[in-house]
Amino acid sequence: AKSTRTGVHVYVPDPVTGTAGGDRLRTMEELRTALTDGELVVFLQPQLDLRNGDVVGAEALVRWNHPTRGLLSPADLLPAAEQAGLLRPLTDTVLELALAAAGRWWTDHEVPVSVNLSAANVTDLDLPDKVASALRRHGLPARALTLELVEDTLMTDPERGRAVLSDLRRLGVRTSIDDYGTGYSSLAYLRHLPADELKLDRSLTADVDRDPRAAAIVQHTVALAHHLGLSLVAEGVETVATSVTLARLGCDVAQGYAIARPMPVDDFLGWLVASESALLDEVLVPLLSQ
Ligand code: C2E
Ligand code: MG
Ligand code: MG
Ligand code: MG
C-alpha cells in the first residue's frame, strides 16, 4: 500500500501474487459487518475562532471500534473501505453519527459539524438528497453541516463534482476545501469551486514560528481566501505559540492539538460546555493578551 498526502493508503496489488493480502481481505469483510453492527464511531475535534475564542465548528473523524484490534484510525480503515467499494455507505454512516451528535448540542450551541467526503461521494448525484433527508431526520438546519473535500476528490469528474457541490450549497450546507495547498492545481480549482472555507494544510501551518517562508505563504493564502470571500481555517495547530502567530497572520479559525485532540462524542459535549464557561484558559488568555 502506498501512502498519499492525505494519509489515506492506495491499494497496490502484491507484486508477486497480484492479490490483496489475507489481512486486507479479512478487513474488507469485517468492515461490511462493522457498518451495519454499529462498530464505527466518530471522534470530534473542535475548531476555534481566533478572534474571540468561540467554538465555531467540530470535525467528525471516523474511528472503528474493532472487536479484537481496538480503536482503528482512518488510515487503517479507509483503504479497505475504498477497495471494498464501501466509501459511500461509510459516508452515510459517518453523516448519520455526526448529525446525531450535532442534534444533541444544536439547541444550546449552534456549532456546525464537519464531515469529510471522498471522491466516491462527490460524484454521487444522490448526495444532496441524502444529506437533505439526514438533516431533516435530525431536525437540523442545513447550516449545521459543513462538508470537507480535498481538491483531488474532484479530479475523476470535476464537472459532476461541481454540480453536486453547488446543489449542496443551494441547500445551505457549507463546503470546505481540506488540506489546501498540497494539491496540484489549487488556484485553478479555487476559481470555480463552490466553497465557503479553506483549510490550510498542517504542512504549511506547523512551521510558521520558525520559517519566514511558511509565514509568507500563510499570509498570502489568508489574503487570497479573504478576497474570495472564504474563511481560512488553519489545521494541525499543535502549540499555543503557533496559534498566536496564525492569529496575527490573519487566520480566522484554528483546529489542532493545541486546542483539543479529537474526542468521543460524550466528551465533546462536556468540552463544549466547559469551553463556554472557562474560555479555554491555556489557549485563549495567552492569545488575546498578546
Ligand atoms: P483531515 O480531514 O485533514 O483531518 C485532520 C487529521 O489531522 C485527523 O487525523 C486529526 O486527528 C489530525 N490532527 C488534528 N489536529 C492535529 C494536530 O495538531 N497535529 C497532528 N499531527 N494531527 C492533527 P485522522 O482522524 O487520523 O484522519 C486522517 C484523515 O482521514 C483525515 O484528514 C481525512 O482525510 C480522513 N478521514 C477521517 N475521517 C473520515 C471520514 O469519515 N470519511 C472520509 N472519507 N475520510 C475521513
Ligand atoms: Mg478534514
Ligand atoms: Mg485536513
Ligand atoms: Mg490533513
Image (spheres, helix red, strand yellow):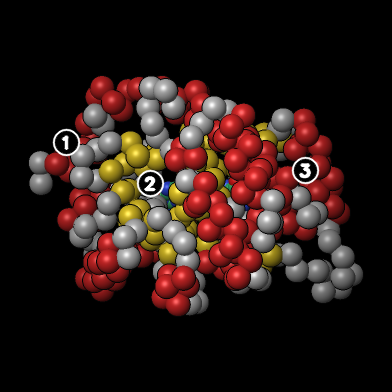
Position of residue 150 measured from the top left corner of the image (x, y, whole percent) = 52, 62
- Asked whether the viewer can see residue 9, the reply is no
Q: Earlier in the sequence, mark 3 or mark 2?
A: 3
The residue that mark 3 highlights is: 31
Disc 1 designates what residue? 285
- Look at the numbered disc 3 and give the secondary structure of its residue: helix
> Within 8 Å of ligand 1, the CB of disc 2?
yes
Q: Residues within 10 Å of mark 2 (few under 14, many from 20)?
A: many
Q: Is residue 26 visible in the rendered structure shown here? A: yes
Q: Which mark is residue 215?
A: none
> Residue visible at 62% across and 29% down?
137
Q: Is residue 272 above or below residue 207?
A: above
x and y percentages locating residue 180 in the rendered image: 43, 64
Amino acid on which disc 2 is placed: Gly
Q: Residue at the left extreme?
A: 289
Compared with 185, 153 (above or below) is: above
Identify which residue, 141 or 121, lies in the foreground: 141
